[in-house]
Amino acid sequence: MVQAYILIQTEVGKAAEVASHISGITGVTLAEDVTGPYDVIVRAEARNVDELGKLVVAQIQTVDGITRTLTCPIVHI
């Protein structure tokens, strides 16, 4: 299992709408709108890195109102 935080920048005024939409995507365990340099923070999980990439590119990045994402895989050292 691969887990990651996905930091999202949105168009002005779209953070709550984006977080709400993303929270319904399979593989997303948490989606919250926040303040700061990013507008939404998502925690997601997938079986492997390839599936995580597909989740981000094919499902999350296509949500209307998103302008940029940064995926941060969780590591256990």
Image: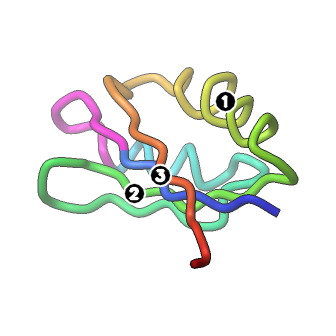
Looking at the image, tell me whether mark 2 or mark 3 is earlier in sequence order.
2
Residue 30, x across and y down, in percent: 56, 66
Which numbered disc, 3 or 1, marks the residue closer to the eye? 3
Image vertical order of residue 58 relative to residue 73, above or below: above
Q: Is residue 38 left or right of residue 42?
A: left
Location of mark 3 (residue): 72
Q: Which quadrant is the C terminus positioned in?
A: bottom right
- Place residue 54 in its image quadrant: top right
Q: Is residue 24 left or right of residue 65?
A: right
Location of mark 1 (residue): 59
Q: Is residue 10 magenta?
A: yes
Asked which secondary structure carries label 2, the reply is: strand
Asked which secondary structure carries label 3, the reply is: strand
Would you call the spot at circle 2 few (<14 residues within 10 Å), some (14-19), or many (20 or more)?
A: many
For image coordinates 36% across by 26% down, the residue present is: 65
Which numbered disc, 2 or 3, marks the residue closer to the eye? 3
Cα separation between marks 2 and 3: 11 Å
Location of mark 2 (residue): 41
Q: What residue range appears in magenta?
A: 8-15
Q: Which residue is situated farthest in the right direction here?
A: 47
Please say if the residues under marks 3 and 1 sit with CB atoms less than 8 Å apart.
no
As rendered, which of 67 and 24 lies closer to the eye?
67
